Amino acid sequence: MRSNTVGKRRSKLEKNIDILTTIGKGESKPTRIMQATNMPWGQLQNNLKMLLERELVMVVDAYINHARYKTDKRCKYSFFLTPKGESVLRYLRMEAADFENLMLVMHASKSR
């Protein structure tokens, strides 16, 4: 997700934001989430467990028909953002944008 951090490690927060963003963009299969976030399987499982415990994401069984959530029968379960997860992601995006604007202002004032 983050192309400008070659060689830098992501914090736990950044990893979880990447997971929430990926799920928010419509990826619901665990393997696709793992690939999109560039995360090892075990680490993804731990992070998803934490996000589930905090009710930011939910698991939908593929074999149970859900009117709201479209699942793929080839995968046992799919992940979706909860309303709480959507609001947390929206808040984090706003904070990131504010932080980026602050950095731009600070950089502009230094170059004067």
Image (spheres, rainbow, N blue to C red):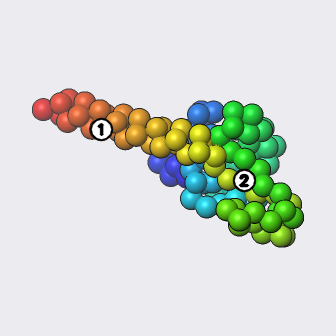
Q: Is residue 46 left or right of residue 69?
A: right
Q: Going from the N terminus, do you reach mark 1 or mark 2 first?
A: 2
SS at badge 1: helix
Please rate how many residues cluster around mark 2, counting C-alpha atoms within 10 Å: few if below 14, some from 14 to 19, many from 20: many
In the rendered structure, find residue 59 and report the number of the disc placed on it: none
* Type of amino acid at the residue the image marks with label 1: Asn
Residue 101 has which mark? 1
Counting from the top left corner in percent of width and height, residue 27 is at 65, 60
Which residue is painted at 46% across and 38% down in the image? Answer: 91
Q: Which residue is mark 2?
A: 79
In this view, the residue in front, 73 or 31, is 73
Check disc 2 and give the amino acid type.
Phe
Residue most extreme to the front:
67
Q: Is residue 101 visible?
A: yes
The foreground one among 95 and 64 is 64
Position of residue 75 measured from the top left corner of the image (x, y, whole percent): 83, 64
In the picture, the quarter occupied by the C terminus is top left
Examine the rendering and report whether any part of residue 6 can be seen: no
